Amino acid sequence: MKTRITELFGIEHPIIQGGMHYVGFAELAAAVSNAGGLGIITGLTQRTPELLAQEIARCREMTDKPFGVNLTFLPTVTSPDYPGYIRAIIDGGIKAVETAGNNPQKWLPALHEAGIKVIHKCTSVRHSLKAESIGCDAVSVDGFECGGHPGEDDVPNFILLPRAAEALKIPFVASGGMADGRSLVAALALGAEGMNMGTRFIATQEAPVHENVKQAIVAASELDTRLVMRSLRNTERVLRNDAVDRLIEKEKTLGAALKFEDIIDEVAGVYPKIMKEGAMDAGAWSCGMVAGLISDVPTVKQLIDRIMREAEEIIGGRLARFAAG
């Protein structure tokens, strides 16, 4: 299946594995790339640029296919060593970078000079247009359904994707609610040139996370996510657990007086405990509503092959029959 996204990144299938904290390690990125998609290493999960360089080298040993790095630009008091991370990406021969968070404009010249294609995560049409205007090569359009940070506009993909298609000249992928061949065909029908999957890739055999995490996603329905930190304008979609219930109770009790310090126990530094140790109530962790569509833990190759088979059957079979009628 050829689209502008497969051409841009030199991949076989228009499927990207999004950057995910404490999930996007070399094992998963290599498995996705080997299966014909674009695997992504999560840059800031590696605590230093040197560790990122090692992770890129480790991934290189597992795949000879293209893979990328996610770099999230955070509004933090003590900023990560972004010049160091950019250097590690360039020196590591990476040709695709997924940026997220704050505007990546100041880093684009160095990335483009090194022949790197940049896809920026956006939760609105206005942010997508901004990404296009500063020179991003593509965008990942994240609907309200997505795990992690869906922005503050609450527009689901059935509206957001066609709006993006009307407004953008650069290619974009659909993110949020993506799980299978139906998702891919729907995304293409609405104007996207591929899809980005996060939660679905956590529930795979190669995902280097605790089995408890995978089983929690399989067990969850589409009703089991919650939105937290809305009053802080840092909304995050997470899977409901004891810590999330506590967090929501604090939000209700404190209302507009809520500060980040009040919920630090539920959100800060919890990912290693959850993803590595399987302590499922240790804190809030990102998960999409798409959990309701996930019922197994296949290998990455089985998953991607199945998605492409389903997509081809829908386009060539079911939809073709409607057109013929």
Image: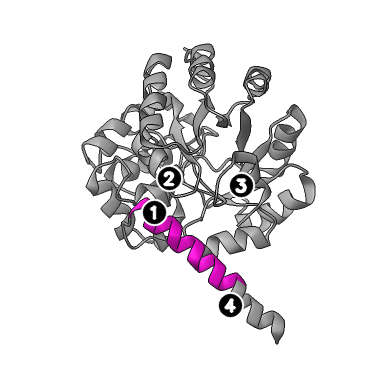
**Rounded to the nearest whole Å, what is the CA distance between mark 4 and mark 1?**
23 Å
Label 2 element class:
helix
| Label 2 Cα crowd, 10 Å radius (few <14 / some 14-19 / many 20+) | many
Q: Tell whether label 1 touches label 2 (CB within 8 Å).
A: yes
Q: Pinpoint residue 40: horizontal percent, then vertical percent.
A: 47, 36
State whether the magenta stretch is mostly helix, strand or loop. helix
Q: Is residue 18 above or below residue 13?
A: above
- Whether the residues at callouts 2 and 4 have beta carbons within 8 Å, the answer is no
4 or 3: tag closer to the N-terminus: 3
Question: Which of pointers 2 and 4 lies earlier in the amino acid sequence?
Answer: 2
Q: CA distance from mark 2 to mark 4?
A: 28 Å
Q: Which residue is mark 2?
A: 34
**Left or right of residue 273, residue 41 in this image:** right
Q: Percent from the top left, x then y, of residue 284? A: 35, 39
For mark 4, what is the residue?
317
Q: Of marks 1 and 3, which one's residue comes earlier in the chain?
A: 3
Give the residue drawn at x 36%, y 47%: 202
Task: Write down the region rendered in magenta.
Answer: 299-315
> Residue 182: horizontal and vertical position, in percent?
53, 66
Badge 2 amino acid: Asn
Which residue matches tag 3? 6
| Cα–Cα gap, marks 2 and 3 | 14 Å
Q: Could you say which is closer to the camera, residue 78 or residue 94?
A: 94
Q: Is residue 261 above or below residue 119?
A: above
Amino acid type at image mark 3: Thr
Q: Which mark is residue 7?
A: none
Q: Residue lying farthest front?
A: 64
Determine the CA span between mark 2 and mark 1: 8 Å
For disc 1, the marked residue is 301
Residue beneath the point at 32% across and 57% down: 298
Q: Residues within 10 Å of mark 4 (few under 14, many from 20)?
A: few
